[in-house]
Amino acid sequence: MALPKRITIHELGPREGMQIEKNPVSTADKIRLVDRLSECNFHEIEVTSFVSPKWVPQMADAEEVVAGITRRPGTRYTGIYLNAQGIARAVKTGKLDVEGSLSVTASETFSKKNTNRSIEETLAEAERRIDVLKTMNVPTHEVSVMAAFGCNYEGNVDPQHVVRLVDRLIGTAADYGMDIGLIQLADTMGWGNPLSIRRLVGLVQDRWPDKRINLHLHDTRGLGLMNAFAAMEMGVDDFDAAVAGLGGCPYAGFKDAPGNIATEDLVHLCNEIGVETGVDLDRLVDVAREAEAIVGHPLPGKVMRGGILQSYRDRASSTSSTSSTSSKSSAVAL
């Protein structure tokens, strides 16, 4: 095994979690969730999405949420935007760390459902997106492929197809003088398994050994953490996750399926296998419980219910120590 010494976790709960909630979440609660997560020492928190309220009404208060959060030194605060108008809105807040990304979906059907564009239309749009990013002086170092492991509408996705898409995005970026350092592979609909993770990650590592890989994993069918571990065994050290398992894609065709891997479950796994995250797990578990209260329904995170193993170890050690002291005292008295 070649487990990394440390991984970076991008917390997506405030953005990806809120976009799929059926019941409105108040602006104040969204702000509170971001601020509580800020106390957990994340590298990045994805705050909101600058999309049309017509299509995603849950994000109608994007500017208000950004205005209300309290930034913590050492944490990057980011957002999502699908077009020039969204990028302009994010830049105008003056409060976010705005970065660009070139993305495409590996499934033709899902691409049309999710973005109303075909794969080829999306790739053609990448050039126009680069022009906008450059005009607004927004740095771009990432390319992303969604539904990289499979699609509910089209089935399994050929890993070589994903590699070709990544190659085209990196090539387009290079034509405009952009140096891509991160390749994101998104298991948008939870089709990945440890073998398919290793297969695709291996192909990408072989083709671009100098690039860092980020995995955006969903726990739709219960394999999320297994997939994260399989990727870590291959040296992947950059992951997306959402507190309490918030999130999911509104266009993936699911009904009440789990969304992203739960951040606290991922941090707990890393603690158990000796991989550092820098995240305060005790505080994060408290935030996970608060996130569940905010949305008003059960969330799929497990550690917030089962507890942190190290807490049980400490308790058992304390009990053992007390018992031992008591025994010695009894022996002296006798």
Image: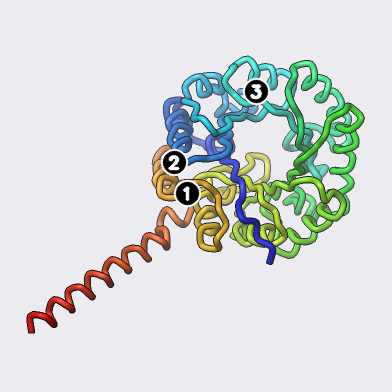
Q: Give the residue type that dot 3 points to.
A: Ser
Q: Give the residue type that dot 2 points to.
A: Ala
Q: Which residue is mark 2?
A: 291
Q: CA distance from mark 2 to mark 1?
A: 8 Å
Of the numbered discs in the image, which one, if any, rests on residue 299? 1
Sequence-earlier tag: 1 or 3 = 3
Circle nearer the viewer, 2 or 1? 2
| Residue 172 seen by the camera | yes
Query: Residue 129: where, in percent of width, then height?
Result: 81, 24
Q: Which residue is mark 3?
A: 52
Q: Farthest residue toward the left?
A: 333
| Residue 19 seen by the camera | no
Sequence-earlier tag: 2 or 3 = 3
Which residue is more in the foreground, 48 or 172? 172
Which residue is more in the foreground, 48 or 253? 48
Q: Name the residue: 11% across, 80% down.
A: 332
Circle nearer the viewer, 2 or 3? 2
Q: Circles 1 and 3: CB distance less than 8 Å?
A: no
